[in-house]
Amino acid sequence: MTNIHFPKLSDYDPVTSAEGALDPLGLYAIADSLAMRLVPGMRERMSHPRFLTAMAVGNGFTRQYDEDVLAADGQSEPYIVYEWHVVEGIIRTRGKDPQLSGLPGTLKARDCLRDGLSLSAPRYLKTATVFGFHGVYRLLADNLDIIKNGYLGENGYQLLSIWEKEQDLTGFVNGDGGPGLSRRQQLQAAMTDALKKGSIDRSGTWEGWNFFGNHLFPNAIPPLERDMLKRFLLSQKDSSRAQVIRFLVSDKGKKTFQIAKSERVFHKALMPFVDEETHHLIETIAAYETFSRILQDALDDCLAAMTHQHGRISPRELATTPGCQNAYKRVPAMFNALADRLEPYSQTVRFTETFGTLAENTSAELWIQLLFDHHVRIQRQKPPHGKNAWFERFDDGSLVIRAGYRRTAGGHHDTEYVHSYRTNSLLSFAIDLGMIL
């Protein structure tokens, strides 16, 4: 099939900044909670289900270390050390493969190889426990009973068994005799040396690198392993996740998303094919995204107006922007109904506490000041010590945009979702698992 709408994935290495450049209005937390209700275990950055297999393989021998064991750097747990080997091994052996995509830490590994170095904590992802593949896929591994609380679940054992058999590595999982035993010992020795050194301790000529490229390449899954992963994803046939996947891989669902490239359009087409509970959830998502778009457009219009002003601008002037004119009228009118709609998902209290001040019926000029106060409060609450607002505010109430947030265009002023509800991730999974050809 041509023209598939693939997810756009960046390298897994977020920049830490005092600016707080993400989620300026605090909209993300509720959207993320709703997304997790719709497709449990799935995260936005997920792209390839074979990382679940890589996690199961690593867990099979990293759990041999005591829970308090760390590498010589004093911070890296055995599973992170294993992850270094997976990433460096794939880049060393399959780095030029045109299929390769979605591997966290790719740029870091390439930089190390270019400089003649090996991966270690300082040379890997800044927050590897979150943005490495273990961090990204951990929730799904738990949800699918592949790895729970750090140990292999029942499905994890099944997955390892079928992987071992299909890869002709008998003996790898249990350490019994067979062609997999020597591989296991080889990797275990590399792990032990890396833990002692605090970095990978194998040269580029190490034969063990081929294990990762040959047996754990994330962008090609052998048939038996693929069928098992597919079965895990669809095992709860009445779950909302299974309902979304079944529609996505159907002719109608595939065509809808391929043409529209819109989750709102896809969800509207999906609703006749789901149960009542999932139908209500999708309607709630659509309503919350309308609310989110209105607020985001109001802020974005103000940022654009501040940029064009080239100096101080008053709230009165900002209140004339289309986004503000739309928001101050619509947000109070829709607030209570949306709060009630969020109640089944335990988000009503969070919603009212976070956005309650914006529900006041007031003038456009006063409402836009409430929006600015809301933004400042959201930024101050961000961990670990708060973030700066996107503008400077003066005693007379006028504002100047800070340099990093200047923009020439305002809000989108459309109905598209502000947040992701994992359809791109599910599409990538479905393609890898042969559910979409």
Image (spheres, rainbow, N blue to C red):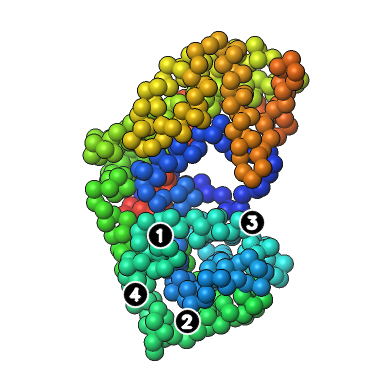
Q: Is residue 57 left or right of residue 69?
A: left
Q: How many dots with numbers?
A: 4
Q: Which residue is mark 2?
A: 184
Q: Residues within 10 Å of mark 4 (few under 14, many from 20)?
A: some
**Image quadrant assignment for residue 201:** bottom right
Check disc 3 and report its element: helix, strand or loop: loop
Tag nearer the camera, 1 or 4: 1
Tag nearer the camera, 1 or 2: 1
Q: In the rendered structure, which amino acid carries the disc numbered 2?
A: Arg
Which residue is located at x 52 percent, y 79 percent?
187
Which is nearer the N-term, disc 1 or disc 4?
1
Q: Which mark is residue 141?
A: 1
CA–CA distance in space, label 2 to label 3 = 29 Å
Q: Which residue is mark 3?
A: 126
Q: In the rendered structure, which amino acid carries the disc numbered 3?
A: Lys
Which is nearer the N-term, disc 1 or disc 3?
3
CA–CA distance in space, label 1 to label 2 = 22 Å
Q: Is residue 167 left or right of residue 242?
A: right
Q: Which mark is residue 118?
A: none
**Image quadrant assignment for residue 173:** bottom left
> For the view shown, which residue lies furthest in the bottom direction?
177
Residue 50: x and y in percent read 42, 63
Q: Is residue 243 shown above or below 369?
A: below
Q: Quadrant of the C terminus?
A: bottom left
Residue 318: x and y in percent read 63, 16
Q: Which mark is residue 161?
A: 4
Which residue is located at x 45 percent, y 37 percent?
30
Residue 111 in view, yes or no: yes
